[in-house]
Image (cartoon, rainbow, N blue to C red):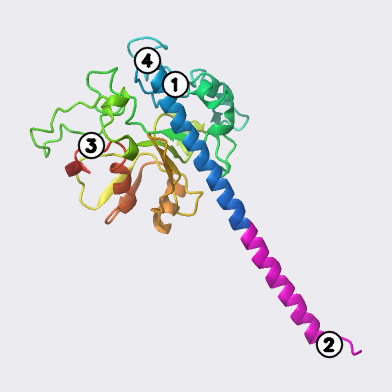
Amino acid sequence: MRAFTLVELLVVVAIIAILLAIILLASEKVTRQARATTCLSNQRQLALAIASYTGDNNGRLPNPRTDSYDVQGSPVGTLTGPRNVWVDNRDGGRVTADGIRSETPKALEQGALWSYMDATPLGYLSPMDPTERVRSYSMNAFVGVGGLSPGARADEYFAFPDLDDASMSPAIQGTRFDTTTLSRIPQPSRTLATITEQNINTDGGGLPINYNEHGFVVRVRPPTGTAGEWIDVPATWNLGRINISYLDGSIDAPAILYEELSLRMEQQGHGVIEYGSRPAFRFFTQILLPGVIPPEIQ
């Protein structure tokens, strides 16, 4: 029996290397898909927790903010501080040795949804999240708000959209949005509930924060020509897809991010401007509060 030649051995080694590479790539893809599925399952659980909370509280939705103090520091239960925040970081989180303020598990436990999430932190954290934070998700900033401040139109502390803009028709100017109860959400199956959000953030003094403060929002406002402003940006872990849930408990992973936009989101974190036809931005303006925010200002 003749021995293998060197060339034949090299061919065999090359074939084995190719097969191993294919197996590793397939394994990586399966692992990524499994993590994405778990991430979406967590968000379905959060959406169902929101629904259960609402059913137990006369239709009132949890507040998307992440502390029970307003920007002036009013304590929980006052006229200016929301009482039913879904995550309550009232203790300010911990500051690590490298000067980064991080959210603690206590913030989850103090939130309105804790008991509806089986009193476990697992459902708040995406397995796709590469950071060390305890929460990967944010609630829609336009849901569960509008009841505290007479001037609030959507997000409790930001006047979005700016319906007093001079370009708005008289019928739209001065409109006030109140979404404190589920009955005020005309299209729950199309209204964003939760989303995976980037964690790049700083507090008012510039201290880095390793968690997302308050709800997710883009600047819904009168058309600005060729630009759309992302005040917050979604996480880019799922290769162009964004994992989200809707208020009716349904989930989705729309493939709307493109490479140029994803890179700027990863580098900039917040306040990203999307130019051109802004397809990703327009998608989110349509699911923040459909049936309430007029299409003409998207």
Find the distance from the CA under tag 1 to the CA under tag 3: 28 Å
Q: Which residue is mark 4?
A: 81
Q: Could you tell me how far apart the alpha carbons at marks 3 and 4 are, in whole angstroms?
A: 28 Å
Question: How far apart, in angstroms, are the residues tagged by discs 4 and 2?
Answer: 79 Å
Q: Which residue is mark 1?
A: 67
Which of labels 2 and 3 is toward the front?
3
Quadrant of residue 251 within the rendered picture = top left
How packed mark 1 is, by other alpha carbons closer than 10 Å (few <14, some 14-19, many 20 or more), is: many
Magenta segment: 1-27
Residues at badges 4 and 2 in contact (C-beta under 8 Å)?
A: no
Q: CA distance from mark 4 to mark 1?
A: 9 Å
Q: For the residue carrying disc 3, how many other residues have a C-alpha within 10 Å: few (<14), some (14-19), or many (20+)?
A: some
Mark 3 residue type:
Gly
Q: As drawn, which residue projects farthest toward the right?
A: 1
In terms of secondary structure, where does tag 2 sit? loop
Q: Which amino acid type corresponds to the residue marked 4 in the rendered image? A: Gly
Q: Which of the 4 image quadrants contains residue 292? A: top left
Placement of the C terminus among the 4 image quadrants: top left
Mark 1 vs mark 3: give the one in front: 3
**Front one among 198 and 172:** 172
Tag 2 or tag 4, which sits nearer the N-term? 2
**Pointer 2: residues within 10 angstroms few (<14), some, or many (20+)?**
few
Q: Tell me the residue at 29%/28% (across/down).
A: 158
In the image, residue 130 above or below residue 174:
below
Q: Which residue is mark 2?
A: 5
> In the image, what residue occupies the spot 57% across and 21% down?
106
Q: Residues within 10 Å of mark 4 (few under 14, many from 20)?
A: some
Residue corresponding to mark 3: 291
Q: Which mark is residue 151?
A: none
Amino acid bearing label 2? Thr
